Amino acid sequence: MRYLWSVPAAVAAWFVAGFAPSYLTGLPAGSTTFVGTRLDLLVLGGFTGGVLAGLIVARLRYAVPLVLIVAVGSWWLSGYDLSAQGLLMSLLVASVVGAGLGALGTRNTVLAAFALSVPVAWFALRPADELQDWLWLWQLNGLLVAIGLTTLLYAACWRRGWPSAYSWLPLSVFYVASFAMVDGIQAVAAAKGQSIDVVADAGTDAFFAAFEPLLREYWPWLLLAVLLAIPMVALKVRALPPPPLAPGADDGRSNDAVLSDDLDWIDREEPKRRLLPARR
């Protein structure tokens, strides 16, 4: 019964999280294009949708074929030629990798937090592209960066609680690197059609150039995210039921194995009493 709702929900999540925010506002009237031909959106959108689909389905053997069918079907319904192997393969590989990490993340929430780092970083950068001259842009970007990191730190401790806090430092580093990954993928897509050296240099420069301004401008927000995640995890751990007691040496054994021989009469049936007839 679970798959009756998880499969359609995963299909909707693959499209809505991966491609709807980028294309529903920019498509011409009457267009049936579900996915675009930009390499950065194919990779980031396919990966983001695949992660959410894997988290919803929660089974690797079901999530991978599902996202493959959805990706190929969306590409075909959009009217693109299936012979465009480079772009189609980018979409398929990104969707499969995301679905695999999402399905495995249901068993280990630390892995799920690492998988969600790139999608969260991608969505956190979206307002900066649309509101370049807004007065409160720094505050909005910092708030989105902090909310994203707090969500990831909280998700890492969802299953095991404080023992998973050891992953906070590498998770924070990977979260910052996710912003550089997004910038690198977008730079590679913008340099498409040029020589391999130019494309590689553009991606590398964009990747390493994203660290310094991010850490310089938003380090207070990153620190605030960590401080906010601590009470959230504490409240989560306090709300969890207590762990079951460890089995003892006498669990599963009958009373005969615990009681001594002089107390063995307790388990014996008491003989029926015979009443004497009343004297007349």
Image (cartoon, grey):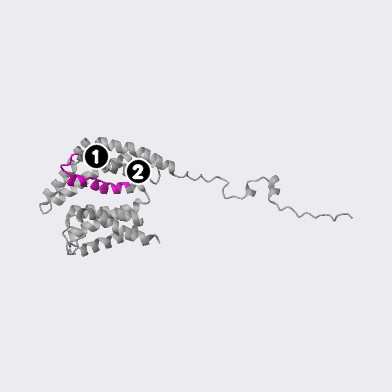
Q: Is residue 122 magenta?
A: yes
Residue at which label 1 appears? 142
Say whether residue 219 is visible: yes
Say whether residue 61 is visible: no
Q: Around disc 2, counting alpha carbons within 10 Å, would you say few (fewer than 14), some (14 to 19), or many (20 or more)? A: many
**Which quadrant holds the C terminus?**
bottom right
Magenta residues, start to end: 113-135
Q: Position of residue 268 (x, y in %)?
A: 70, 52
Say which element carries label 1: helix
The amino acid at mark 2 is Tyr
Q: Is residue 144 magenta?
A: no
**From the viewer's perspective, is 267 left or right of 199?**
right
Instruction: Work out whether mark 1 precedes mark 2 in sequence or the reverse, and give the earlier one.
Output: 1
The label number, if any, that marks residue 169 in the structure image: none
The amino acid at mark 1 is Gly
In the image, which is nearer the foreground, mark 1 or mark 2? Answer: 1
Residue at which label 2 appears? 154
Quick check: marks 1 and 2 in contact, CB under 8 Å?
Answer: no
